[in-house]
Image: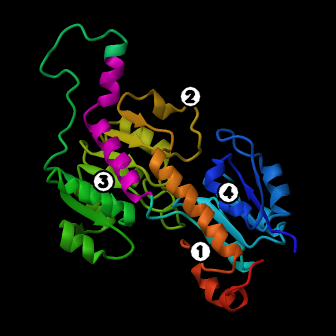
Amino acid sequence: MKKPFVYITRKLESDIVEKLGNIAEVQMWDSIEKPVPYDILKEKASKAHALLTMVSDKVDESLIASAPYLKVIANLGVGYDNIAVHEATKRKILVCNTPDVLSDTTADLTFALLMATARRIVEGHEYIKKGHWQDWNPYLMAGYDIHHKTIGIVGMGRIGEKVAKRATGFEMNILYHNRSRKQKAEEELGAKYVSFEELLGQSDFVVSLAPLTPETKGMFNRKAFSLMKNSAIFINAGRGLVMNEADLYDALVNKEIAAAGLDVFEKEPISANHPLLKLQNVVVLPHIGSASLETRKKMMKLAVDNIDLALQGKEPKALVNREIWNEKKSQLHNKAF
């Protein structure tokens, strides 16, 4: 019987993907840095039984509709808004992601971004490199305290809870807003559930970790920024499209808020000429929330495991559209494609 075909959209280490070679024909795009062009991805998908994709790959309705053999899409990341999940579900295609293994690492980066923005770390670094440090004064690079301040977390999922745990070390007051109450976070971390508007008005640091949904898209807009304190700092390490960048720029220029730290953007990669990059009170990163060597390897291995299990007719470890699993289970159980 002919082996199923697996296509991987970046060049991953051979020892990570070798287990797939035991059950499938595996092809990889030949670059770790350059994304596979959409037309090539679509052509490969038309023959593939499984895709291992990056969050930057566009897996839209057209691509999925032209992939008659596709059984599973394993995305390298906790987010999956790059995939037309509804179309995949309609066609009984399993969609997988890589949660949990990246939560601590992303929380580390989120808090590092908060601290770098508040204490003007990047600005101070550049100040010295440009030869501007000629003397000292009491207000030289004075930023904002973090300890004993109020942090407001929008999106209290796995990563949000990890960020809240780190905030306890700084003796911060923790507020959160989420689609549902998180009793564990309230009991163990002292987090307090509030409305979105209350969180904006009371927080010294507003941290967005919300997933991208029709409800969250553009939620950080002109109105939202106007409700924040003038001394508030906005951190977005979740999804770029939950914020309106033009409104954020205006809020910063008009001093409605003090600063912003961003790991994600409306369009990625962000242009070097983007207006936000001209502002000194903005710290930006190239979407590296989970980018530690250890965690990225764990994510790759989990994505590979998801495909390996799916192609053997077993339940993947991290399944997004779980509603179709029970329907497929009787057909897939103990049966390889």
| Residue 184 vs residue 231, the one in the foreground | 184
Question: Which residue sits at x=60%, y=66%?
Answer: 305
Which of 126 and 206 lies nearest the eye of the viewer? 126
Is residue 103 in the magenta section?
yes
Q: Which tag, 2 or 1, sits closer to the chain's start? A: 2
Q: Nearer the viewer, mark 3 or mark 4?
A: 4
Magenta extent: 102-127
Residue contact at pointers 2 and 3, CB within 8 angstroms: no
- Whether residue 285 is visible to the viewer of this picture, yes or no, is yes
Q: How far apart, in angstroms, are the residues tagged by discs 2 and 4?
A: 42 Å
Secondary structure of the residue carrying tag 3 is helix
Q: Is residue 332 above or below residue 310?
A: below
Looking at marks 1 and 3 on the same chain, the residue that comes earlier in the sequence is marked by 3
49 relative to 124, above or below:
below
Give yes or no for contact between labels 3 and 4 (Cβ–Cβ under 8 Å): no
User: Mark 1 against mark 4, which lies toward the viewer?
Assistant: 4
Instruction: Say left or right for 154 vs 318.
Output: left
Q: Which residue is mark 1?
A: 316
Q: Give the distance between the C-alpha atoms of the residues marked 2 and 1, in whole angstroms.
A: 42 Å
Q: Amino acid at mark 3?
A: Leu
List the residue tagged with mark 4. Answer: 18
Q: Element at badge 1?
A: loop
Frontmost residue, 204 versus 122:
122
Q: CA distance from mark 1 to mark 3?
A: 43 Å
Q: Which label sits on residue 307?
A: none
Tell which tag, 2 or 1, sits nearer the viewer.
Answer: 1
**What residue is drawn where x is 85% and y is 63%?**
46
**Do we see residue 80 in this rendering?**
no
Q: Which residue is mark 3?
A: 227
Q: In the visual, does 273 lie left or right of 179?
A: right
